[in-house]
Structures are given as structure tokens and as C-alpha cells.
Amino acid sequence: MEEIYKGEFRKYLKMLAPGSIFRIGVENILQANTGGLVVVGDSPQLMDLVSGGFNIDCEYSPARLYELAKMDGAIIMNADASRILIANAQLDPDSQLPSNETGIRHRTAQRVALQTGELVVAISQRRKVVTLYQSNITFRLRDIEPILIKANQALQTLEKYRNVLFKELQRLGGLEFEDMVTVSEVCEVIKRAVRVLNIAKEIENYIAELGTEGRLVKMQLDEMTANVEEDALYIIQDYSNNPDKSPREIMDNLLRAFEEDISDSVFISRNLSLGTASSHMEQSISPRGYRMLQKLPRLPVSVIDNLMGRFALLSDVLKASIAELDEVEGIGEVRAKYIKNGLKRMQEQLLLEYMM
């Protein structure tokens, strides 16, 4: 994943997304062909580099930013860009800091960002581009059209991966009811889920850049990724033998590994403590049953936990009689019949869908 989309910088992308009042002010400066330098942040490290100018401490508005940018000096804003603090300021960063920029404005912007970690927005009068600097990140703001094209391409890819994942989840469910699952099949489903979630994260980055223009993309993304992470976490809960990490911690580790393209089925198996070599992939393994039980409507989590405390595996729950289920705290005869019949219908439905 590109560094620009990590951590604090993503917040700044949203701050300068199309349609935001900060972006409107910046675009006004760009269209007026005046250029400008805007710093977002008033940390002590930044203020030590500021000299001259005049304090105004007024509420931000696009019109005020535009008018103040007509002066040569930099504009200093507070950390959330809600107020303009200083106008026509001079910035004096360490000249020994590295910079690959040639123009004075952009070289100053890059060095201020490196020295202070604050966001610096450089608006080029000659090239008519807006460049963001923050710490060691340099990013040029893009128009909406190319971002939308990339977002739509990513959505198409996501849809293909999601459809394959859906079929694999159905297949895994059928195998779970037959108690015929192998480590390889568990790892393959988790791998596909993680890929879907990473593609979704990439699309979320485009949405951050698009601002208000990304609403439709966001709606499509939410629909396509509904329950994907939840299913993956339940699968991890069903199969993990790792006592030191929660399903959430294992999932986060897998997401990071796939992001860096260093993950495979053996890596997943190792994280779940299911085996450390490819020879372990064909070993049989039984699910605990969390994923299937949570699919039963109106079945509280506390009852599922009680079931798992009494019956260690899904196969044990399926074999249990209504009387045995009734003995579990919080169930009773009515709920026992509901669980028994609900799991039977789910098994029949999965078999039917898999055969289609």
C-alpha cells in the first residue's frame, strides 16, 4: 500500500478532497494564477521557523485564503484548517535538509514539512498544480476524473474477487457440515477474504481523495464488502489454535502481510497455528461452529459461547439431541429445536446452492 494513504496523511487528503472548503480556497488561488504557500499546523517546531508577517487569527473561508495569498509570504493555519493565524509570513527551514525541488517555494515547502512534520500546501503559479508535503511524503493533487476511473476499475476487480469468495464460502460451509475440511481449504478462503479487504482499502483511499464526489463509489463498496470481514474473523475463530493472539490480531497481521505481498497459505496456517509446512495443508480440521451458529437469527452471543463451552465442535452440536442441547444454559427446549432445525435448513440450503 502506498505510504500516502497511511496514517495522518489520509486525514489531509480528506481535508483537501474535492468539494471541501479548504479545496475550494486552494482552487481559487490556482485559478487566479497567483500561487501560494499554506502551512496547516501551529506546533512549536513550526512557529520557530516563522518570522515576519502579521497575526490575524480569523476564521477560515475560501475568500479570505484567496485574498491573503495575493501577498508573497506563507499563510499559517491551525491544525484542523479552521482558522487562519498568520499571513505574509517568512519561513526559514534548515537549508541542509535534502530537497529534490528546484523552485524556491516548493523547496521551502518540502524542507518545512521534513523539519516539522506539518502539512505544507504549495500552489504553483507557473505549472498550475497543487503539491502536498508532509514529513517525507510528496503528493500532487489530482483531478476527479482520473481518480474516478481508477476507483471504478478497482470496483470491477473487487466484484470478481467477491464473487469467487462467495462461492468458496458456500463450499467451505458445505464441507463443514460434512466435517471434511482441510487446512488448505481454510487458508484459501481466508486468503481470498484478505484480498477482498485489501482491494476495498485501496478503494477507500480513492474515496478519501474524491470527497463528496465519492458517495456512489462508497455505496457500491459497502454493498460489495458487507460481512466479508465478519465472516473472515469467524473463520479464524473457528479454526485458530493460536492461544496468544485474538482473531482480530491475526486478521490485522494477515492484512499487513498481504499488503506487502509476503503472504501465502503456509503463512496463514502458521499464523493460525495449524502447521508450518506445505505438508500440513491436507490435514483434516474441524470447525468450532461460531460462523454457522451466528447465522441463526436471534441467537445471542452468550448462548453461542455456552454452546461452544459444552460442545467443542460444530459436528458435536449437529450430533447432539434436543435434550442435550436443552441442558445448555440459556437454551431451553424451544430454542434447542430452533437451533437443531435451523442448522438442518442451513445445511440443505448450502448443499442446494453448491449443486447449482
Image (cartoon, rainbow, N blue to C red):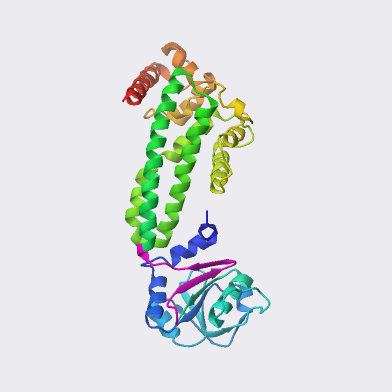
**Residue 127 magenta:** yes
In this view, which residue lies farthest toward the right? 96
User: Can see residue 58?
Assistant: yes
Q: Residue at x 43, y 48 (%)?
A: 200
Q: Position of residue 11 (x, y in %)?
A: 49, 62
Q: Residue at x 58, y 78 (%)?
A: 107
Residue range highlighted in magenta: 126-145
Q: Position of residue 298 (x, y in %)?
A: 37, 29
The quadrant of the picture occupied by the C terminus is top left
Picture mark count: 0
User: Depth check: 208 or 299 in front?
Assistant: 208
Q: Residue at x 60, y 29 (%)?
A: 278
In the rendered structure, the answer to whether residue 12 lies left or right of residue 30 reads right
Q: Position of residue 280 (x, y in %)?
A: 60, 26
User: Depth check: 140 or 214 in front?
Assistant: 140
Q: Position of residue 314 (x, y in %)?
A: 48, 21
> Which of the 4 quarters of the picture holds residue 208?
bottom left
In the rendered structure, the answer to whether residue 112 lies left or right of residue 194 reads right
**Residue 222 magenta:** no
User: Can see residue 61?
Assistant: no
Q: Residue at x 55, y 34 (%)?
A: 265
Relative vertical location of residue 280 with respect to residue 14 in this rendering, above or below: above
